[in-house]
Image (spheres, grey):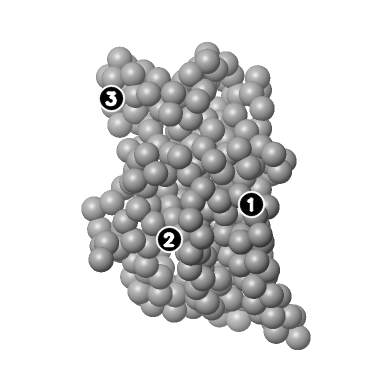
């Protein structure tokens, strides 16, 4: 059995104190095996982004433990957040500059990653000259430049049109396979989760708890509009609706 790259054991997270405290996560147990693609689903405010922040080390759990072992983690947000005054290559080189790498080394690394995300021809362009999908590819290359083997993705394709999102699904799956990454992918799109994931983890409404897990047995590559994806997505959606309805009462 493959060793867990990410392990959350009884993780809770509360913001604030006293009567105004907000509990975002409650005793979450979750493992992601090395090389596994895990998608996290749940209603808005259920703690999905909080969970990624804890794994990334941007925040600390109130209780429980988060273990990533010796793995390196990078986080990709919904917005690409590129520096507008830098070229595409310059944005990707930032990670190397922070680590103090020599200029030639980081330029070579940037060129390799831009080839990986199929943006070599746009290396000298600036972000405003790119489409939304290209900006997200640049952000992905920048995340990979951190030499991470665990990639955390917080609704990275949520603002894109359906066709661009579908193309980036293919690209992400190719890169995930090629680099043997472990991916934790947050989304509100149930079909997207089934299209991409080895496993879909459904979180309860706030406070977030692991409500149910769904293995995705269908072989890759998958189409987001296939009958198999649609069928499992419908089952997950029904379960999510029951949870949202329970919380609304």
Residue 231 in sight = yes
Alpha carbons under labels 3 and 2: distance apart: 28 Å
First-in-chain label (2 vs 1)? 2
Residue 113, quarter of the rendered image: top left
Residue 178, percent across and down? 37, 39
Is 26 rendered above or below residue 119?
below
Alpha carbons under labels 3 and 1: distance apart: 40 Å
Q: Secondary structure at mark 2?
A: helix
Q: Secondary structure at mark 1?
A: loop
Q: Secondary structure at mark 3?
A: loop
Residue in view at x 63 percent, y 42 percent: 166
First-in-chain label (3 vs 1)? 3
Residue in view at x 52 percent, y 77 percent: 212
In this rendering, the label closer to the viewer, 3 or 1: 1
Residue 17 in sight = no
Give left or right: position of 70 versus 237.
left
Alpha carbons under labels 2 and 1: distance apart: 30 Å
Say few, some or many: other residues with alpha carbon within 10 Å of mark 3 (under 14 / 14 to 19 / 20 or more).
some
Say few, some or many: other residues with alpha carbon within 10 Å of mark 1 (under 14 / 14 to 19 / 20 or more).
some
Is 20 rendered above or below residue 246?
above
Question: How many numbered discs?
Answer: 3
The residue under label 3 is 101
The residue under label 1 is 224
Residue in view at x 37 percent, y 23 percent: 112
In this rendering, the label closer to the viewer, 2 or 1: 1
The residue under label 2 is 54
Residue 159, percent across and down? 69, 44
Given contact means CB atoms under 8 Å apart, are the residues at marks 3 and 1 in contact? no
């Amino acid at each position: 059995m493959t060793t867990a790259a990410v392990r959350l054991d009884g993780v809770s997270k509360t913001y604030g104190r006293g009567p105004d405290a907000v509990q975002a996560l409650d005793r979450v147990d979750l493992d992601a095996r090395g090389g596994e693609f895990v998608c996290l689903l749940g209603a808005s405010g259920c703690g999905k982004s909080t969970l990624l922040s804890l794994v990334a080390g941007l925040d600390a759990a109130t209780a429980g433990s988060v273990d990533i072992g010796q793995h390196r983690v990078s986080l990709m947000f919904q917005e690409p957040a590129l520096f507008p005054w830098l070229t595409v290559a310059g944005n990707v080189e930032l990670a190397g500059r922070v680590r103090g790498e020599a200029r030639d080394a980081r330029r070579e690394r940037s060129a390799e990653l831009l080839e990986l995300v199929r943006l070599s021809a746009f290396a000298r362009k600036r972000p405003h000259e790119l489409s939304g999908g290209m900006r997200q590819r640049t952000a992905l290359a920048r995340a990979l430049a951190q030499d991470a083997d665990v990639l955390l993705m917080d609704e990275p394709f949520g603002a894109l049109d359906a066709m661009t999102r579908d193309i980036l699904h293919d690209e992400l799956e190719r890169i995930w396979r090629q680099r043997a990454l472990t991916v934790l992918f947050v989304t509100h799109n149930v079909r997207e989760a089934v299209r991409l994931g080895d496993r879909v983890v459904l979180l309860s409404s706030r406070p977030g708890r692991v409500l149910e897990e769904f293995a995705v047995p269908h072989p890759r590559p998958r189409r987001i509009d296939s009958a198999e994806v649609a069928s499992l997505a419908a089952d997950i959606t029904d379960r999510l609706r029951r949870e949202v309805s329970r919380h609304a009462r």
